Image (tube, coloured by chain):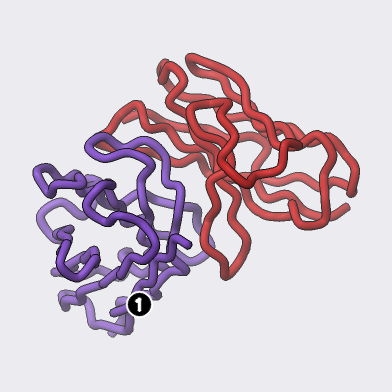
Chain colours: A red, B purple
Amino acid sequence: DVQMTQSPSSLSASVGDRVTITCRASQSINRYLNWYQHKPGKAPKLLIYATSSLQSGVPSRFTGSGSGTDFTLTISSLQPEDFATYYCQETYNTLALTFGGGTKVEIK
Amino acid sequence: QVQLVESGGGVVQPGGSLKLSCTAYGFTFNNYGLHWVRQAPGKGLEWVSFIRYDEKNTFYTDSVKGRFTISRDKTQNTLYLQMNSLRPEDSAIYYCAKDRGRAVPDAFDYWGQGSLVTVSS
């Protein structure tokens, strides 16, 4: 199975900061990489699919990039509603879809 | 708008069974693949199972193979997860999720609010 390693596992940031989260796959997954946002007690939300495609309705301050084994999610200017946990997910191995361990973004 | 509503969670003893349901609204149910995803207390998201739009194929994570069965009923616009031989490590919030695609997993574009399953004696 593909292993997905996210870093950092948590970070503290201020409103307006630029935030970057990294996801590394244990083997090449081409561009089969998605990003989700999850707030406590809420349904997870798709942000980015296929590495860099913005899901409808998601603000343009969220961008994704990468290919092969290394991927990033960038929030260009952190807003109060962005404090949440973020997960990457590979869909290269359709028999064992794997999420990263998550990155909790907290208020500094 | 698209909505997924789970039901059927609860407390069950180890070795017991439970069946989760997820009723879909706001999209053509027969046209999309569907998933179950779980989150154990204090842990991250874990994909559990997928069923194609036409029910012709199903996939499971290794830890539930032979114990869980995913199915769907197009007449009721409902997705199911039959869970047998439950273990304490199956305790989690279970989410149903709609896929962007039909036959091969792509991205999970809509999720339900989740249903809590607790396996404990």
* Above or below B98: residue B56: above
The residue at 82%/56% (across/down) is A80
* Above or below B21: residue B50: above
Asked whether B77 or A84 is in front, the reply is B77
From the top left corner, tell me how far across and down residue A37 is, in percent. Answer: 60, 50
Judge left or right: residue B88 versus residue B72. Answer: right
The residue at 55%/39% (across/down) is A35
From the top left corner, tell me how far across and down residue A46 is, in percent. Answer: 53, 46
Asked whether B90 or B8 is in front, the reply is B8
* Above or below A48: residue B76: below
Judge left or right: residue A83 versus residue B23. Answer: right
Judge left or right: residue B31 versus residue A26. Answer: left
> Amino acid under label 1?
Thr
The residue at 88%/39% (across/down) is A17
The residue at 63%/52% (across/down) is A85
Say which residue label 1 marks.
B118
Quadrant where the N terminus of chain A sits is top left
Q: How many marks?
A: 1
Helix, strand or loop at mark 1: strand
Asked which quadrant contains residue A58, the reply is: top right
Asked which quadrant contains residue B96, the reply is: bottom left
From the top left corner, tell me how far across and down residue A77 is, in percent. Answer: 84, 39
From the top left corner, tell me how far across and down residue B8 is, in percent. Answer: 29, 79
Asked whether B99 or B91 is in front, the reply is B99
Asked whether B84 or B51 is in front, the reply is B51
Asked which quadrant contains residue B13, the reply is: bottom left
Chain containing the residue with disc 1: B
Is the residue marked by circle 1 packed among few (<14), some (14-19), or many (20+) residues within 10 Å?
many
Judge left or right: residue B10 versus residue A81. Answer: left
